[in-house]
Image (cartoon, rainbow, N blue to C red):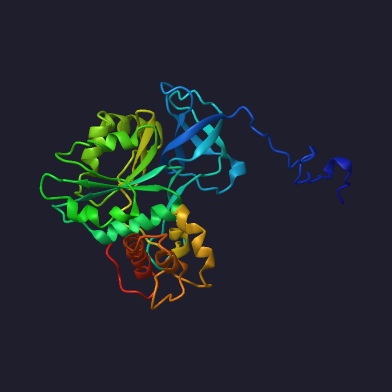
Amino acid sequence: MPREYDESDVRIRPGRRGSRPRTKRRPDHADAREAMVTVVDRGRWTCAPDADAELPPVTAMRARELGRTPIVVGDRVGLAGDVSGAPDTLARIVRVEERRSILRRTADDTDPFERLVVANADQLVIVTALADPEPREGFVDRCLVAAFAGGLTPVLCLTKADLTDPAPFAALYAELEFPVVVTRDGQPGELAALLRGKVSALVGHSGVGKSTLVNALVPDADQRIGRVSGVGKGRHTTTAALALPIEGGWVVDTPGVRSFGLAHVTPTEVVAAFEDLAAAIEDCPRGCGHFGPPADPECALDALVTAGQLRSERLAALRRVLVALRAAAPGAAPAER
């Protein structure tokens, strides 16, 4: 006979949404601990808390509300959750402060996608050897473009001065009026004073003596690298930036940055880095590349030279750096990196 059904046989599918009303309000994390990112390693960020240098590094993950917000070495962040730094603990990065400078590059000169390398650095220390290997003017020029465009003060560090006279190469950049320091026998010399109390990113080709300088500036660098790397999911490799403390400041070693694609930079961004020239180029015609005649016959920088407000030697030095940027334009011949 047919089965009879009652209400116990009826199954009601629960609604997909819970009964608790949803809200878009998010906590403001006013009590988040301020810190600086020192290592980025596969979805984990090692952070140095402010106020007490003896506090252990804190391993953190990116909070869900930040989405895909990029976070790089040097970023100032707010930490919530377990910020003890104890083994196997994990905090959350809930806030990324506005950056005051950013070192960027692209994979090559035709790639429009920017890669953030270091945030909030005061200086970009361009380490180049005077011999063995020979200095690469093109690489230095590209680093200068990246520094000027990113708001960093460039510092040219010439190593291995015991092998040859540094004066000829240093003279190429004298008119740009940024620090040029010379080191011998792997000792930092006057460079140490320039780094004190600042965040400084170091870049350079393999073999120029950058690692030797880092070890001289931070005597226990190898031990610190091992200790900090062990906090995260993996170990620091030569493809990632790493911040090391030094006398009230930080040295950011960037061994993975061998070259700078400059697809993200314009000539105006470079010239605008010079305060005394930024206002003048507002009078340049639209599309001016600031290269001067014949490409830019009405460039306002030439008018400054005519009026005696800008030394011709300084303008020539600046334009030589801009040539490195022009050579990086799509379709141009490959430039020295």
> Where residue 310 appears, x then y in whole percent?
39, 60
> Where residue 40 appears, x then y in whole percent?
42, 41
Quadrant of the image containing the C terminus: bottom left
> Where residue 215 appears, x then y in whole percent?
24, 34
Residue at 44% of width from left, 40% of height from top?
74
Closer to the camera in the image, 116 or 147: 147
Closer to the camera in the image, 6 or 39: 39
Side (left or right) of 154 relative to 284? left
Q: Is residue 112 visible?
A: no
> Where residue 22 appears, x then y in whole percent?
76, 41
Q: Is residue 249 visible?
A: yes
Q: Residue furthest left?
A: 163
Q: Quadrant of residue 139?
A: bottom left
Tally of marks: 0
Side (left or right) of 134 relative to 100? left
Q: Residue furthest bottom?
A: 294
* 114 vs 295: above or below: above
Residue at 89% of width from left, 47% of height from top?
4
Q: Quadrant of residue 94?
A: top right
Closer to the camera in the image, 224 or 253: 253
Side (left or right) of 190 relative to 282? left
